[in-house]
Amino acid sequence: MKNTAVIIVGQGFEDSEFTYPFYRLQEENIKVDIVTACDKPITGKLGQIAIPTLKSSELDELNFDMVILPGGHEGPDRVRQVKDILKFIKIMDNNKKIIATTCHGSWTTISAKIMKGKKATCYKGMKDDLINSGASYLDKNVVIDGHFISAPHFRNNHQWLEAIITVYNKRKDA
């Protein structure tokens, strides 16, 4: 494993769903890159600035162990419109690399067409989108389905990151 993650966000992302994993993963000695939907610095709902370290066209599955997809309603809607990001997510899924979503983050995985047959949770307002994509919706604080980890809300950040790190460490130690 490379000990690397990428957080992908769009303008209007949920600040804590970006900031918490950014620092928490680094505490685990995981290098964190940032990609924004427009390849430029963007602002979250509450003013957090995300400065990209890579362009979406530079995303390469070989360079990452995991991808983190925060929510925030507007942000994921912008992210899911970028073809390079959708292609990257699909390849990450095909290679069973960790994909972690929270809140509306699963809009991106839905648009990448990888949700069929997965168990997942999300923000309650997009529950029907998740079900219509072929996923099994579970009303839980965090859902782990193999390499796919999901949570419904920023109030679940600690459970979400605990699950991400647990799955990551099991894979690293295997």
Image: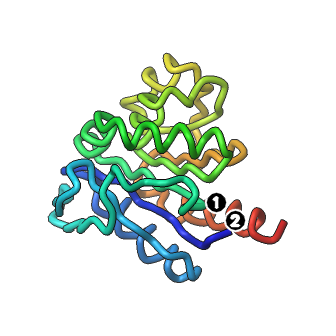
Q: How is the image coloured?
A: rainbow
Image quadrant where one finds the N terminus: bottom right
| Residue at (39% x, 52% y) in the render | 70
| Residue at (60% x, 33% y) in the render | 138
Q: Secondary structure at mark 1?
A: helix
Residue 65 found in image quarter = bottom right
Residue 60 position (above or below residue 169): above
Label 1 vs label 2: CA separation?
Answer: 5 Å
Amino acid tagged 2: Thr
Residue that carries the numbered disc 1 in the rendered image: 163
- Kindly identify which numbered label has been placed on residue 145: none
| Residue at (42% x, 37% y) in the render | 86
Q: Nearer the viewer, residue 106 or 36?
A: 36
Mark 1 and mark 2 in contact? Answer it, CB < 8 Å.
Answer: yes
53 sits to left or right of 32:
left
Q: Nearer the viewer, residue 87 or 9?
A: 87
Q: Nearer the viewer, residue 117 or 59?
A: 59
- Tell me residue 115's x, y (percent): 56, 29
Instruction: State the residue lying farthest toward the top.
Output: 132
| Residue at (72% x, 45% y) in the render | 146
- Tell me residue 120's x, y (percent): 59, 36
49 sits to left or right of 63:
left
Instruction: State the residue lying farthest toward the right.
Output: 174
Residue 128 position (above or below residue 142): above
- Tell me residue 164's x, y (percent): 61, 61
Image quadrant where one finds the C terminus: bottom right
Amino acid tagged 1: Ala
Q: Secondary structure at mark 2?
A: helix
Residue that carries the numbered disc 2 in the rendered image: 166
Circle 1 Cα neighbour tier, 10 Å, few/some/many (<14 / 14–19 / ≥20): some
145 sits to left or right of 137:
right
